[in-house]
């Protein structure tokens, strides 16, 4: 089935004064008969510490721009850039999860939009180790509580309770193995049919590709589509190949996927909601039943011995799906070069049961965790 | 050698097209630069007069300035303001050459002018031409036969210059009399900044941004134009104003441009806010344009009126009250 998708440019770089560097990556929420966008407005395509949160108002039916204002930033560290806003209404507030860029660190925070101000609201500290660069944490409301979808594979969800975020679910599904690049969230989730609709993205051959997924009311990943939007069609802007869906709105039988285009413009892909629902339900999440093996080794000699053993192991069992867990993902290219059929290299999660452990030093495969702790 | 377009700007009833065309004819030999006349008093009759002057010798286009919120039939203000940035940007959109030269009206191109343009084009430099302001100019066949120099009209850069070579200058010393730049560079910085259109100073403000974009800016005494001082005073002048604000209002407004402190001493007025915005943002891009020149075609120009700002950039008052 091929979905009919209509594309439309909402605003281009330069259309507003002080937007020569682009106006893109919009958050969006429906408010009555209007859609409020919150875009990242850059004055210069060269790096400058200055970036402006630009609020745009669209007529929800015609998508015509009817108003704009620049929000005043309140409460952010001096010299910090705030960018890439994903908006959500929650508990009577209009919130935006967005990146806070500081020297040596990029991290999501949650802000509150109060009239013509955007105010730092929540430092958004998740109980999980974080890297120097963290992006694409998205929000949704489930049973009256604010949830965060941190990662799609392992499906990692947190809930805000009191002053803290708590882990709700961390469940591997193997989806990330479908793509050579990182599989990431694109948008906050919106209520859709009997679950929550979101978009995912990855980078294929230098272009961003995007698809949809549906999280069920039991917070399991139920459906996902293939690639619906392909950034290779974006040939202009400051970054050709970048089509970045950053917000979803369902209105009047349509799903509006607002996106940044080439890090320069804001556009929207318009889906028929029924068609999109049918596409989603036609593509269920395949159940993954892998053999989970933990790799234990330190050097390239260990990799060689372990993968030689893995070849034998795979062949003896008719090449089953194998997830090989490594503590250092930089080993992935070396491991993949051995081309063990149906073997995917995965990061070692915090809590996983291993079926086997492959010992690099001896080239042996032992049942269970091999006496090691995860 | 890349193609060269000359952009000539005027809002005057008598801009002395004849002086320009004749002096250019003496300069260019067999070269055929494209001429773009951006004419605030554009009419069929003026176009026909130009065609007669040029006599088929050179490709030329006679176009009106693009819609401006500050000047002309689309303006939102109560009267016509200077709006040179808007007019220059009109020329950038229309020009097809790779290297653009801007020339003010009421000018005679002096001997050697074109050779300097060619040199600038060859090296891809920004060229800042020298000027002289004169009274009682006697011009014949494109040559100045006599004039009286205006005492206050001396080019402030002249002493920095050299009769035998070009000298490097700062972007803030790029003045509008005649200057030249690669079109790609003008597009890269999105042209002149319409913030300047009520105040003036779009030339040096562009120069600073060109410098920040990495351009080499050369001042040339030999790229000289002579301008008539008395003809400058003909007819109704387009206004330039310098509004003043209370310091707190000034700082609030400045903050809206992302600038939290003053970068230049002086009064709390619009010409100083231009400087505070420029040096506060350090941006190569204009803050007052509502279009992106690299994406803008001639066909887009009429529609730009739909994107006009409605409020004055300096203090937020409705443009209809300005």
Image (cartoon, coloured by chain):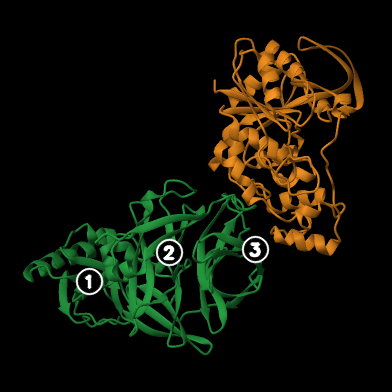
Q: Residue at x 83, y 26 (%)?
A: B159
Question: Chain drawn orange, letter?
Answer: B
What's the mark number on residue A70?
Answer: 3
Instruction: Give the spatial CA distance, label 2 vs label 1.
Output: 34 Å
Residue B312 percent location from the top left of the image: 75, 54
Residue pictured at 85% horizontal, 48% vertical: B242
Q: Residue at x 54, y 23 (%)?
A: B2
Identify which residue, B45 or A255, lies in the foreground.
Answer: B45
Secondary structure category for the residue under label 1:
strand
For disc 1, the chain is A
B101 in relation to A286, above or below: above
Residue A371 visible? The answer is: yes
The answer as to whether the residues below labels 3 and 2 share one chain is yes
Residue B163 higher or lower than B41, as above or below: above
- Locate the N terminus of chain B by quadrant: top right
Residue B42 disc label: none
Chain letter behind tag 2 = A
Relative to A70, say whether A45 is above or below: above
Q: Chain of mark 3?
A: A
Q: Which residue is mark 2?
A: A257
Badge 2 element:
strand
- Tell me the residue that label 1 is attached to: A323
Residue B141: name its quadrant: top right
User: In this view of the protein, which residue sits in the foreground, A103 or B292?
Assistant: B292
Name the colour assigned to chain A in the rendering: green
> Where is B183 relative to B281, above or below?
above
Give the mark nearer the N terminus: 2 vs 1: 2
Name the front one of labels 3 and 2.
2
Point out residue A355 in the picture as x, y percentages from the top left corner: 19, 80
- Would you call the spot at circle 3 few (<14 residues within 10 Å), some (14-19), or many (20 or more)? some
Is A69 displayed left or right of B195 in the figure?
A: left
10 Å crowding of disc 1: few (<14), some (14-19), many (20+): many
């Amino acid at each position: 089935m091929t979905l009919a998708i209509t594309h439309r440019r909402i605003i281009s770089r330069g259309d507003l004064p002080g937007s020569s560097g682009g106006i893109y990556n919009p958050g969006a929420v429906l408010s009555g008969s209007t859609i409020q966008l919150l875009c990242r407005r850059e004055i210069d395509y060269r790096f400058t510490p200055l970036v402006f949160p630009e609020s745009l108002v669209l007529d929800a039916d015609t998508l015509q721009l009817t108003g704009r204002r620049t929000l005043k930033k309140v409460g952010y560290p001096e010299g910090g850039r705030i960018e890439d806003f994903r908006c959500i209404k929650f508990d009577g507030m209009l919130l935006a999860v967005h990146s806070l860029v500081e020297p040596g660190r990029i991290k999501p925070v949650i802000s509150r939009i109060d009239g013509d101000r955007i105010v730092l609201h929540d430092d958004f500290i998740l109980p999980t180790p974080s890297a120097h660069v963290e992006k694409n944490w998205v929000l949704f409301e489930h049973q009256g509580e604010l949830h965060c979808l941190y990662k799609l594979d392992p499906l990692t969800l947190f809930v805000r309770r009191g002053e803290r975020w708590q882990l709700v679910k961390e469940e591997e599904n193997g989806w990330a193995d479908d793509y050579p690049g990182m599989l990431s969230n694109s948008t906050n989730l919106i209520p859709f049919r009997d679950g929550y609709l979101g978009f995912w993205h990855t980078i294929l051959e230098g272009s961003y590709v995007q698809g949809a997924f549906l999280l069920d009311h039991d917070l399991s990943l139920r459906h996902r589509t293939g690639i619906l939007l392909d950034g290779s069609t974006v040939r202009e802007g400051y970054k050709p190949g970048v089509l970045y869906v950053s917000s979803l709105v369902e209105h009047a039988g349509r799903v509006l996927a607002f996106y940044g285009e080439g890090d320069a413009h804001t556009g929207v892909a318009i889906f028929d909601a029924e068609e999109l629902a049918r596409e989603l339900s036609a593509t269920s999440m395949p159940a993954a039943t892998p053999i989970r093996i933990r790799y234990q080794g330190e050097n390239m000699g260990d990799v060689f011995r372990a993968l030689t053993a893995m070849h034998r192991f795979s062949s003896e069992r008719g090449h089953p799906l194998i997830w090989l867990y490594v503590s250092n993902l930089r080993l992935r290219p070396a491991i993949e070069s051995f081309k063990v059929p149906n073997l995917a290299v995965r990061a070692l999660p915090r809590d996983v049961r291993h079926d086997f452990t492959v010992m690099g030093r001896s080239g042996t495969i032992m049942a269970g965790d091999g006496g090691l702790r995860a | 050698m890349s193609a060269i377009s000359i952009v000539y700007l005027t809002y005057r009833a008598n801009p002395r097209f004849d002086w320009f065309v004749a002096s250019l004819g003496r300069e260019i030999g067999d070269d055929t630069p494209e001429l773009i006349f951006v004419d605030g008093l554009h009419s069929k009759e003026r176009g026909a007069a130009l065609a007669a002057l040029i006599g088929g010798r050179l490709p030329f286009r006679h176009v009106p300035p693009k819609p401006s919120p500050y000047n002309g039939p689309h303006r939102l203000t109560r009267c016509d303001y200077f709006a040179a940035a808007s007019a220059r940007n009109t020329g950038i959109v229309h020009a097809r050459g790779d290297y653009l030269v801007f020339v003010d009206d009421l000018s005679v191109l002096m001997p050697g002018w074109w050779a300097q343009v060619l040199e600038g084009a060859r090296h891809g430099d920004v060229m800042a031409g020298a000027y002289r302001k004169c009274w009682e100019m006697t011009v014949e066949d494109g040559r100045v036969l006599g004039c009286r120099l205006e005492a206050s009209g001396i080019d402030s850069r002249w002493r920095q210059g050299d009769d035998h070579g070009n000298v490097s200058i700062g972007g803030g010393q790029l003045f509008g009399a005649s200057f030249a730049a690669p079109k790609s560079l003008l597009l890269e910085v999105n042209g002149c900044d319409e913030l300047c259109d009520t105040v003036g100073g779009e030339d040096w403000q562009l120069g600073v941004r060109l410098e920040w974009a990495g351009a080499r800016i050369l001042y040339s005494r030999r790229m000289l134009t002579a301008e008539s001082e008395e003809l400058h005073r003909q007819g109704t002048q387009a206004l330039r104003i310098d509004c003043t604000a209370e310091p707190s209002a000034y700082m609030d407004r400045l903050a809206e441009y992302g600038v939290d402190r003053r970068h230049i001493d002086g009064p709390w007025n619009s010409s100083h806010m231009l400087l505070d915005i420029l040096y506060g943002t350090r941006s190569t891009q204009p803050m007052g344009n509502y279009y992106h020149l690299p994406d803008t075609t001639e066909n887009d120009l009429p529609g730009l009126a739909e994107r006009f700002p409605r409020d004055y950039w300096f203090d937020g008052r409705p443009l209809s009250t300005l």
